[in-house]
Image (spheres, grey):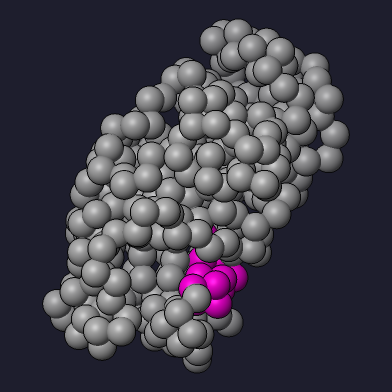
Amino acid sequence: MRICTFEQRGEAYAGIVAADDTIVRTEDLVAGAIEEDEMLDLLLSGERFWTELRSAARDARGGVPLRSARLLAPIPRPPRNVFCVGWNYSEHFEEGKQAREQAGPQLAPQEIPQFPSFFSKNPATVVGPDAPVFFPAPHSEQLDWEAELAVVIGKPGRDIAEADAMSHVFGYTCANDGSVRDVQRRHGGQWFKGKNFDTHLPMGPWIVTADELDASDLAIRSRVNGVGKQDSRTKFMVFKIPRLIAEISAGCELWPGDLIITGTPAGVGFARTPPEFLRVGDVVEVEIEGIGVLRNTIKGRI
């Protein structure tokens, strides 16, 4: 089941992407506890509602044509910061280590850590497919791309065991963890500021529910102006999704609607020779097998 958030007459609605490539409002399929924030209310409605919606979605037809709809991020305004994972593909760690060694040995850890590295991105970073991503000038000229699989939490929990972790996953979407590299390095080794420019976390185009997708081995790619930059598979994650959920939920309750972006594979711009960074007008695509393509254009601020 593909579930999106789309805009119609200035209002945002949750919808099912039907087999005929139209979007049918979830409210038209199943009556539920949906009020102001449709996607979050859907997630809070629980498994019985999801089962009814899944059944109704099989026969859904005749909605708004997908090609003419304006899609927003699946969760346009997350309820709190997005949980983010660094150095979660071994090849990305190695390419980053080599680039950091050129800047100074003190910046280059020699081994992948035993525990995942976490940071967060605030809700204002989140935008949807085809939304503009703002170039960070005058603060920086070093905007980088990072294709990532995003996990959408559906069932709340604290201190979740790895063995139980996947039962808390509602679904998956694509993400691009935009990173302002010189700002990221500038602040004493922590990444928060360089990862938190407005619009620097495009997500979408929709959520594919966990019952329809095995996220343990999916192709994940990025392109800039049609040129491939990253090409890997999620099976190469160092810390798998159950481990990430267990680590994040230790002493911290996860809520329905929480988002976890799970790290990026090799092929990012700063580690290339010479380094490559995005420019105004560039079109960035993130494609994940079984989900779809997330496309955004870099825009200058007016």
Q: Residue at image x 50%, y 76%?
A: 190
Camera-nearest residue between 23 and 39: 39
Residue 23 found in image quarter? top right
Q: Does 196 sit above or below residue 183?
A: above
Give the side of residue 294 with respect to residue 203, left or right: left
The answer to whether residue 230 is seen in the rendering is: no
Left or right relative to 50: residue 219: left
Quarter of the picture holding the C terminus = bottom right
* Residue at x 44% of width, y 66% of height: 178
x, y percent for residue 176: 43, 57
Give the farthest residue toward the bottom: 138
Determine whether 151 is above or below 117 in the image: above
Q: Provide the residue span drawn in magenta.
A: 191-202
Q: Is residue 20 above or below residue 183?
A: above
Rendered position, 233 above or below 281? above
Closest to the observer, 47 or 85: 85
Residue in the picture at 75% in, 30% down: 44
The residue lying at 27 percent from left, 37 percent from top is 235
- The reply to whether the magenta stretch includes residue 196 is yes
Reply yes or no: does residue 93 show up in magenta: no
